[in-house]
Every structure is written in C-alpha cells, then in structure tokens.
Image (cartoon, rainbow, N blue to C red):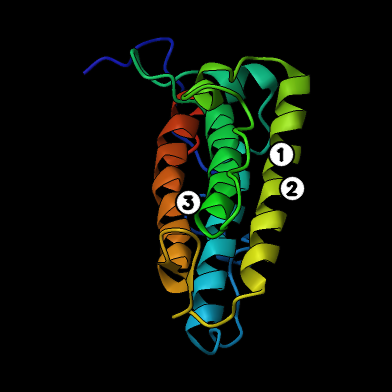
Amino acid sequence: MERMSDQPARWSQATVYPDMWADPDNDPRENDGPSPDGELATLEDFLSGFRLTLRMKCEGLDAEQLARRSVPPSTMSLLGLLRHLAEAERDWRNWISDGDPLPKLYGVRDADFDGAVADQALVDAAYADLEREQAATDAALAEHPDLSERLGKDKIAVREMMVHRVEEYARHCGHADLLRECVDGRVGQ
C-alpha cells in the first residue's frame, strides 16, 4: 500500500520504548509511589492524568495545527477539544447547582468546535478558559467530599459526576491520539 504524500510518518519521542508517546522515565504522568488511597482520591488521580494527557497531546503545535480538522464532515480538532472540555466543565457546575445555569462559553451548540479556528489569541483563550473552568468545577466539588451526596436539581451523586468527568476526558484523549497522529504522525500511548 502506497503512503499518501500529505500524510505524516508515524513517530514517537520515546527511545526506550519506541511504540510509546514518551519514555516512562520522562512521562510526567508516571508515579513510582503508591496509588492513591480511597475512591475519591483515585477518581481525582485518574482525572488529573487524563487532563495532563490532553495537554501533552496539544504540546508543541501551532494554532493552525491545533485547529486542523480530522476528517470531513467532522468539525473535531485538538483546539475544539480544549474548548469543548472547557464548556463541559462549566456545564458540570450547572448539573450540581440549584441556581440558574451558567451561560455557554462559546454561544450556540457546537460553537466550541465550529469556532475553533487557527488564531493564536483563540488558542490562548481556550487554554485559559479550560484552566479556569477546571479550577471552578474542582472547587465546587471539593465542597462535597461525600461521593454519595446528591446535588443539583436532578440530584446527581458526586460519584456519578466524578466518574462522568473521568469518562469524558478519557474518551476525548482517544480522539486526541488520532488527531495528533493526523497532524504530525506522533503516536498515542
């Protein structure tokens, strides 16, 4: 099978294990210590790891590369994922609140992906939005350490919210693997 000329060759920065994204000794997600104690700490650890993975998948790319779409008709891009997850973090606070919902960050439905265009100011804003929304959702949930507590109008359990957050990031890290490989050939791990 002939390789298309516009497709990047597969590559990895790993040297010890060339099929990995990064060598285990240089991977900031690797921890030689004991695993976290307790369910909440474990969920938070997994969430933190997937958040870091998403950032690693976006590292070293310029605005055009981050905004590059996968395959038509999809509007998915790495920049779109950053924006989508910022929007999701904000929406999760709506799930656990009894008050009026927070407005969408990017306007109408799918604007997180549709508006992800190659503009460095937009990239910078997406990273700032994601960081701010993650911190706000983390802070809101930190007030409720009992995983069985039910919150918001729909009485969602904190446990369900935490598992859903882990699932959402994990799923989108899989998308990010494929998007990054399409951009420059860098393989996932």
In the rendered image, which residue does mark 3 sit on? 169
Where is residue 153 drawn, in percent x and y? 46, 58
Q: For the residue marked with disc 3, what is the amino acid? A: Tyr
Q: For the residue marked with disc 1, what is the amino acid? A: Asp
Callout 1: helix, strand or loop? helix
15, above or below 128, in the image: below
Q: For the residue marked with disc 2, what is the amino acid? A: Arg
Q: Quadrant of residue 7?
A: top left
In the rendered image, which residue does mark 2 sit on? 132
Crowding around mark 3 (Cα neighbors within 10 Å: few <14, some 14 to 19, many 20+) is many
Callout 2: helix, strand or loop? helix
Quadrant placement of the N terminus: top left
Callout 2–callout 1 Cβ contact below 8 Å = yes
Observer-nearest residue: 107 or 111?
Answer: 107
Work out whether residue 29 can be spotted: yes
Callout 3: helix, strand or loop? helix
What label does residue 129 carry, if any? 1
Where is residue 184 drawn, in percent x and y? 52, 26
Give the residue at the far left of this rendering: 1
Q: Distance between the residues labelled 2 and 1?
A: 5 Å
Residue for point 48% across, 78% down: 149
